[in-house]
Image: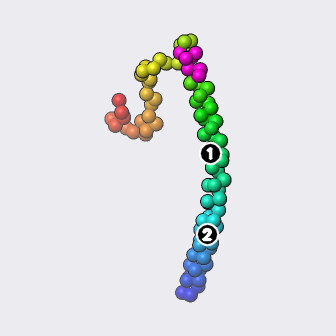
């Protein structure tokens, strides 16, 4: 019976060590990703500005839908798994 408790104690100690290491490393990893996220956000804003600038040109050529035009709703993925009676129509 003593060996069972010893095994459980070793498991708990190893788990505690892993949790402490994660507790220390995780904030460093999150802080390290912040500059990358800022860079991605800046790139996305730049891309959106380029697309907004090109939108009137696309509309004049008929490549982009006019404002207020209803778009076709894509098929829901969940419909693939539902019985026919429960699918949204």
Q: Which residues are magenta?
A: 53-59
Residue drawn at point x = 61 percent, y = 69 percent: 20
Image coordinates of residue 77 in percent, x first then y, are: 46, 36
Q: Is residue 35 above or below residue 85?
A: below
**Label for residue 20?**
2
Left or right: 70 as drawn, with respect to 18: left
Q: Earlier in the sequence, mark 2 or mark 1?
A: 2
Task: Identify the residue at image location x=33%, y=35%.
Answer: 85
Towards the viewer: 12 or 6: 12
Tell me if I can see residue 62 in this picture: yes
Split into 4 quadrants, where in the image is the C terminus?
top left
Residue 88 vertical placement versus 64 (above, below):
below
Q: Main secondary structure of the magenta part?
A: helix
Which residue, as the protein is rendered here, is positioned at the far bottom? 2
Q: Position of residue 79 (x, y in %)?
A: 42, 36
Query: Is disc 2 in contact with disc 1, using a CB cutoff of under 8 Å?
Result: no
Secondary structure under badge 2? helix
- Crowd class of label 1 (few under 14; some 14 to 19; many from 20; radius 10 Å): few
Which of the pair 22/14 is nearer the observer? 22
Q: Name the residue beneath numbered marker 1.
A: 37
Look at the picture and state if 89 lies above or below 65: below
CA–CA distance in space, label 2 to label 1: 26 Å
Tell me the residue at 59%/72% (across/down).
Answer: 16
Secondary element at image label 1: helix
Q: Where does residue 34 sit, x and y in percent of width and height?
A: 63, 49
Image quadrant where one finds the N terminus: bottom right
Would residue 80 be seen by someone viewing this image from the given angle? Answer: no
Tell me which corner region of the image, top left, top right, bottom left or bottom right, holds residue 75. Answer: top left
């Amino acid at each position: 019976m003593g060996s069972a408790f010893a095994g459980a104690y070793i498991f708990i100690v190893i788990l505690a060590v892993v949790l402490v290491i994660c507790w220390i490393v995780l904030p460093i990893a999150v802080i390290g990703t912040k500059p990358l996220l800022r860079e991605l956000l800046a790139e996305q804003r730049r891309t959106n500005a380029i697309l907004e600038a090109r939108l009137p040109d696309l509309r004049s050529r008929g490549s982009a839908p006019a404002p207020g035009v209803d778009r076709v709703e894509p098929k829901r993925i969940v419909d693939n798994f539902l019985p026919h009676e429960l699918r949204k129509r």
